Amino acid sequence: MRRTVILTIATLTGLLLVWLLVVRVPPPQPPAASPSTPVVLAPPAPADPPPGEPVPARPPETPVADTATEPPAPPGTVAPASPPPGSAAPTDDADASADETADQPADEPATDSGGDDGGPPEIDADHATDLLADMIARAESASENVSTPNSVVATLKQFDQESVDADWSENAAQHIEASLGEWIAALPADAQAHLALIHVECRETLCQVLAADNDPGTADERSRAGHEWQQAIGTLPQQPWWHELAFVAFDTQVSNADDHTLYMSYLLREAKAPPAPDAPAGTGDTGSSDGA
């Protein structure tokens, strides 16, 4: 009986092992099917029309335009823009004008012989000096040809005959030039450009002041604004040095030449009083004594 039990247990164990093997082993996978090539069916051929019916005409095929494009511009270059339809192409004259403008330096000022408003250019001090020299030469020539010259000619002749006062002349000239320079510096910039103080010189009793203006067209306007040269000379007696240097009067001659207004002014110093003559030697009382 024991043998029968053992055989029964062995048989059951074997069946159990077989069942486990059947459950754990996966079934074999079937091989993947290769993709099938799609079959494109050809369109059916058009049926022939029945006898007696006209064959419909096919529309003409439109030719395909040549769409070849220009190769792109290399990097760093700008393709020239095409002019808009209807615009005129640039002419050779316009190109030449553009080239001339490009050749000019950017910082080069535009040349203009006149002022911004079409007036005269800035005054040339050298040319004004020559005009004043000619005016003085004519006045000196007139003083030699007339026996009774006018006051201006007489003053010029006196100035030429005077010598320099070493203790007074240079000091007086410096004060006059400084005061007139301040007056000119206070003018508007456009007025300063047309006015020049040419020369200041002092002798023993007279100081000669020469100036010029090359914009006579605006003389009336400048005079109303207080910018005329005679008014500048008229401010000198208000200076503190006027009386300290013993000035007593002034005079101005105005002349025109070559579109310039020329000024020749004289400042008169008070004449020194001549030294008093020595008193005559007194006659002592000699008296006479009576002899005894």
Image (cartoon, grey):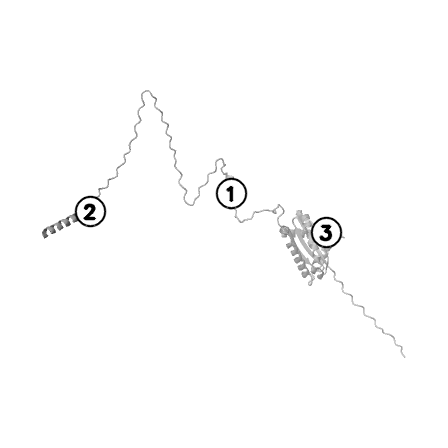
Q: Amino acid at mark 3?
A: Ala
| The furthest residue to the bottom | 292
The residue labelled by disc 3 is 142
Compare residues 89 and 251 and report the one nearer the observer. 89
Q: Are marks 2 and 3 in contact (CB under 8 Å)?
A: no
The residue labelled by disc 1 is 98
Q: Amino acid at mark 2?
A: Val
The secondary element bearing badge 1 is classed as: helix
- Res 72 quadrant in image: top left
Q: CA distance from mark 2 to mark 3?
A: 152 Å
Q: Is residue 17 above or below residue 238?
A: above
Whole-percent x and y of residue 100?
A: 52, 44
In the displayed structure image, the side of residue 292 where residue 65 appears, left or right: left
| The furthest residue to the front | 1
In the displayed structure image, the side of residue 169 where residue 282 appears, left or right: right
Whole-percent x and y of residue 113?
A: 60, 47
Which mark is nearer the camera, 1 or 3? 1
Q: Amino acid at mark 1?
A: Ala
First reached walking from the N terminus: tag 1 or tag 3:
1
First reached walking from the N terminus: tag 2 or tag 3:
2
The residue labelled by disc 2 is 23
**Label 3 neighbour load within 10 Å: few <14, some 14-19, many 20+:** some
**Label 2 neighbour load within 10 Å: few <14, some 14-19, many 20+:** few
Please tell me which residue is depicted at 70% across the width and 51% down the height of the picture: 254
